[in-house]
Amino acid sequence: MKRIRISRCGSQLLAQPAPRRPLCPYAAGLQRNITPHSQRIQSRLQSTTATSDEFELEEGEQAQAGRSRRSRLETKHTPLEALPSPHPSAAERSSKLAALRSRLSLPQRFPLQTLARTLVHPSADPNPAFNNASLSALGSNLLGYYTTEHLLCNYPRLPMSVVFAAEYAYIGPKALATIASEWGIEAVAEPGGEVDPGLLQFKRLRPGDDVPAALRRQAPWKWNVTTTHKILTSDEFGTPTPFGSASLPKNEPVPLEDSAQSFVRALIGSLHLHLGRPLVKRFFRDHFLSRHLDLSTLFDFRTPTRDLSRLCAREGFEAPVARLISETGRLSRHPVFIVGVYSGKDKLGEGAGSSLDEARVRAAAAALKGWYLYKPVEVTVPSSTEGELDSSKWRPNMVDCGEVIV
Amino acid sequence: MPVLGLRAIAKPQNGVGAFILQCKRLDFHYCDWAGSSRGMNAFIKSSLPAFAKRNPAIEISVSPRPNQHPVIIGHYINGRQKAICVRNLTNEGVRAKAELLRDASGEKNRRVTKPVSSLNESVRGIWSPLHGARIKI
């Protein structure tokens, strides 16, 4: 695992040192704010990134990139069409970018050049200094962190599979693509230097072509993939293969959804670098957590009655008993039974069904949901105390012993 | 595996956290020669800069369309367009039409009979004949 400071992830350090196009002046300012540990570490950082597997260019491509770099130096003579993605100076003149910035209520100090860079997918421009791969990696981690802490602190008893499903619902690939379309992002027909930088730049998958193998995310089925295994090795959605375009070969066409996701992630990453943590948290709360998700619809119980009796045994409650509360039309075509599940004198859950068994199973599922969806009244998430000196506001969160294991 | 998670997507609620203006682009088309564009031309000269400044979230483009009536076309986030012909309208009338397009959601016009629609379930619950005290006759 490489160790790169988080604020350096989106900086130009990931690029080759030779100058190509004029660099973003804001990024230079960002780099100046960071106090370097030592020159040696810096040089090591550069060398590791240069040899990293994620951002290395292939040999043939490198020669090609060198040629294009040389040609890009003479910007005055190079036609814009020769560039793989729009020139950074075009961002200031783009009305689409300015409109997007104010549509998302971002402050004026967030530079349009960075916003333009978040819209460049690696499939359009393989150069890491101009595409959003690094910002996207940072934003992906931030999104995962904020969503996970929200879920785990607010719902401490949630089973792990439901945590995975809830993360997928908030920041999963499909959710991010939907969010990008709700922000009014339009995509280019073909990326290039002459197009408006306010459009999403990526190489389109032609209709009828197969999705690249790196994006298909299909791992062969294994019998021994347990929940613990998923926690340790998979991503935040419980998907076994690592997703994202980092492992994608360069200049490979991708579907629109993948480039839209990378834009949303890169926007979060660049907001973190330019505007700081509090604003990113507010942006995350406004745009992601404000979406409507009913967690109780994500549960899929196999044997709720057995789970409930195991839960009662574990917690030291009396064994659950199902009792008929009310019924109507037992001998008719559509009977309704209301069944409650009781532990001693306490009613744990209640369900209605058209047969006694169905009602009992529904009642047990309702009781289990009531247990798993417990929400503490006062919650302080770990990120709320980041960077603060006094820790008096911190209240330790409840940690549950976990879901029922049958 | 006692419980599995079902995959879903969180639903958007525009305006609950952040508000995204649904109109993303307004196209203003005018004609230099025809008389029906007189109000539109006055609007573009006098009021459009202020309108654009008040609505920074909208991309505005102005382009001539010779020998045609003036028209404002709004492009919306849901992919639809709305066009309003503003022939023979005054400066104020054109501004009113532009604001109408700005405030529209892009959906088709439909009659609203129920003023409130919500994703949340009712707090009070649905009345059930099977609960509560039995009626004794």
Image (spheres, coloured by chain):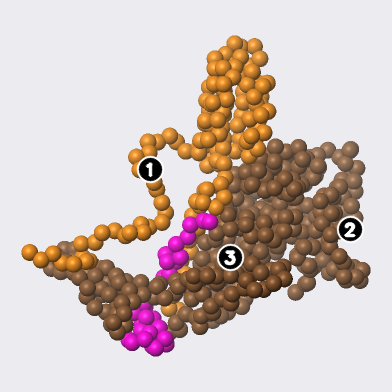
Chain colours: A brown, B orange
Q: Residue at x 13, y 64 (%)?
A: B135
Q: Residues within 10 Å of mark 2 (few under 14, many from 20)?
A: few
Q: Which mark is residue A116?
A: none
**Secondary element at tag 3:** helix
- Name the residue beneath numbered marker 3: A147
Q: Residues within 10 Å of mark 3 (few under 14, many from 20)?
A: many
- The C terminus of chain B: image quadrant: bottom left
When the figure is inspected, residue A305 is found, relative to residue B126, above or below; the finding is below
When the figure is inspected, residue A44 is found, relative to residue B48, above or below; the finding is below
Q: Nearer the viewer, mark 1 or mark 2?
A: 1
Compare residues A388 and A49 and report the one nearer the observer. Answer: A388
Q: Amino acid at mark 1?
A: Pro
Residue at the far left: name it: B137
**Secondary element at tag 2:** loop
**From mark 1 to mark 2, how far is it between C-alphas?**
60 Å
| Span of residues in magenta | A290-319
Numbered disc 2: what chain?
A: A
- Choose top left, top right, bottom left or bottom right for residue A300: bottom left
**From mark 3 to mark 1, how far is it between C-alphas?**
33 Å
Q: Nearer the viewer, mark 3 or mark 1?
A: 1
Q: Residue at x 87, y 67 (%)?
A: A36
Compare residues A4 and A190 and report the one nearer the observer. Answer: A4
Q: Amino acid at mark 2?
A: Pro
Q: Position of residue B2 (x, y in %)?
A: 43, 78
- Name the residue beneath numbered marker 2: A17
Q: Position of residue B6 (x, y in %)?
A: 46, 66
Q: Is residue A393 magenta?
A: no
Q: Which mark is residue B115?
A: 1
Q: Is residue B100 left or right of residue A123?
A: left
Q: Are marks 2 and 3 in contact (CB under 8 Å)?
A: no
Q: Is residue A306 magenta?
A: yes
